[in-house]
Image: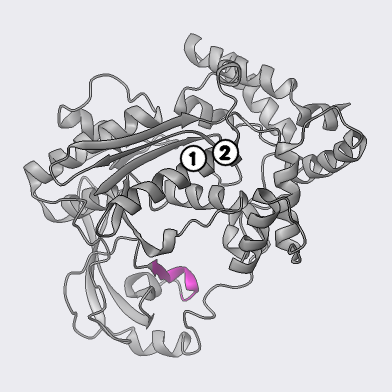
């Protein structure tokens, strides 16, 4: 059994939320066995990013009028659906999306976590990504198309996105709808097409090709898509040095990059269960190996990541399993006695901010907490990434200014979507507690 899925969200960052979701289960012959799709109301703490709204084509006022399912109940619905499919299956189930390993899976897990639900399903799910199959075919099959797009800097660059490839293969006419259900259906058709025409099945493909056959200090040849010079060099051939490895993760050093950058920027941390790495076979020695081993002699999987100072919802795994169990009791059993750690307290408070019902004796106290959170997130303090130069969440003023500029410069359809978003933002509790 295989489950294809897609999420549409309010933001590319995981501190945003899921707007709608779709899961479709298929068998070995691509026959649909079951499905789940629904929409989630935009929660009190969220002001959607205008560029996300333009991407998923959501009129937020209409969305709010039609949909009242809370994030909490939606995540329980998804969890119950996945468990029901797991219970039916004899073996592990593959959960498959397009670019899901870098986006959808992170969003899904974060959303489970912050609602007190375990996202790991007792190891019964295996994660697959159609984009990884596309990368493999692009790198190795001369018949696979090379398509380009113009980026924000007005440069022509390689694209491996679903929409242009689906059009190239005759699977899509017009623009991609970017509704989760339509995107899942397109993803299934696309995956089936790749299997039938290029003999590579996402349901069976092991994207981390080295597996466990190499040991520390081994060198491999590997290929990487050349996104900027694709017209003259379809891919970049380089060599990776294995610095550390266990059954779940590995550290690989890009030796060509290391020549010019002796920092950890030259190292690729790999989750073997979710990431793609092309294996071109064992390589001969490289002149930079000894220097690299000296530079990173103390580095390993245990100390590769420095302590993160980004927001909890940007790296939800700072909630450990004890925190998650305590959060589950607090949210689903109304028992907060086990909430002890700072992270668990933050997660529980944010849950309460989303779920609080106005009209009680606690309104004033709740409003103070909401204002405190709003100042943190939409006042310029919330960090999206770690380090001194870490990115910050957009302020409310920045979001409003972006919306107003887009209304001035956009065509009629986009203008209508952003006008709806601006109206939603100015009518929100976040706007009220910050501006009045």
Residue annotated with mark 1: 77
The image shows residue 168 at horizontal and vertical percentages of 17, 31
Give the quadrant of residue 183: top left
Q: Are marks 2 and 1 in contact (CB under 8 Å)?
A: yes
Judged left or right of residue 289, residue 234 is left
Disc 2 to disc 1, how far (Cα)? 6 Å
Above or below, 359 against 281 in this view is above
- The residue beneath circle 2 is 73
Residue beneath the point at 65% across and 49% down: 332
Classify residue 172 as left or right of residue 143: right
Residue under the point 70% across and 38% down: 354
Q: Quadrant of residue 433?
A: top right
Find residue 264 and report its horizontal and vertical position in percent.
49, 73
- Left-right relation of 14 to 142: right
Label 2: how many Cα within 10 Å (few below 14, some 14–19, many 20+): few
Q: Which residues are magenta?
A: 262-270
Q: Residue at x 18, y 28 (%)?
A: 171
Instruction: Say the numbered circle drawn on residue 398.
Output: none
């Amino acid at each position: 059994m295989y489950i294809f899925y897609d999420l549409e969200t309010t933001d590319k960052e995981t501190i945003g939320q899921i707007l709608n979701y779709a899961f479709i289960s298929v068998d070995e012959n691509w026959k649909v066995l079951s499905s789940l799709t629904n929409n989630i109301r935009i929660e009190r703490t969220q002001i959607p990013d205008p560029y996300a709204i333009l991407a998923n084509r959501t009129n937020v006022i209409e969305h709010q009028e039609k949909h009242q399912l809370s994030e909490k109940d939606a995540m329980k619905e998804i969890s119950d659906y996945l468990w029901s499919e797991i219970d039916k299956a004899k073996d592990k189930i593959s959960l498959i999306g397009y670019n899901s390993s870098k986006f959808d899976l992170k969003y899904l897990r974060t959303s489970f976590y912050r609602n007190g639900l375990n996202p790991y399903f007792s190891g019964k799910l295996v994660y697959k990504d159609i984009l990884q199959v596309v990368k493999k075919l692009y790198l190795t099959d001369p018949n696979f198309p090379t398509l380009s797009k113009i980026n924000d800097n007005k440069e022509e660059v390689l694209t491996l996105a679903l929409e242009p490839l689906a059009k190239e293969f005759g699977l899509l006419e017009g623009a991609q709808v970017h509704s989760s259900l339509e995107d899942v259906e397109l993803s299934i058709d696309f995956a089936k097409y790749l299997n039938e025409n290029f003999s590579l099945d996402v349901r069976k493909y092991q994207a981390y090709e080295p597996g466990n056959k190499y040991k520390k200090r081994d060198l491999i040849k590997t290929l990487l898509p050349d996104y900027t010079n694709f017209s003259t060099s379809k891919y970049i051939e380089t060599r990776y040095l294995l610095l550390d490895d266990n059954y779940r993760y590995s550290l690989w050093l890009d030796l060509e990059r290391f020549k010019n950058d002796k920092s950890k920027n030259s190292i690729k941390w790999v989750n073997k269960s979710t990431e793609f790495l092309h294996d071109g076979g064992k390589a001969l020695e490289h002149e930079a190996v000894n220097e690299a081993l000296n530079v990173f002699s103390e580095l390993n999987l245990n100390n590769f990541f420095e302590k993160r100072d980004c927001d909890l919802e940007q790296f939800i795994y700072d909630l450990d399993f004890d925190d998650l169990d305590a959060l589950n009791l607090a949210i689903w059993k109304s028992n907060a006695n086990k909430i002890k750690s700072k992270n668990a307290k933050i997660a529980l408070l944010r849950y309460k901010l989303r779920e609080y019902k106005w009209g009680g004796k606690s309104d004033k106290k709740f409003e103070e907490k909401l204002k405190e959170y709003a100042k943190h997130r939409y006042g310029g303090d919330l960090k999206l990434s770690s380090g001194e130069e870490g990115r910050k969440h957009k302020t409310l003023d920045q979001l409003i200014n972006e919306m107003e500029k887009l209304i001035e410069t956009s065509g009629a359809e986009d203008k209508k979507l952003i006008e709806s978003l601006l109206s939603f933002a100015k009518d929100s509790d976040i706007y009220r507690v910050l501006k009045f």
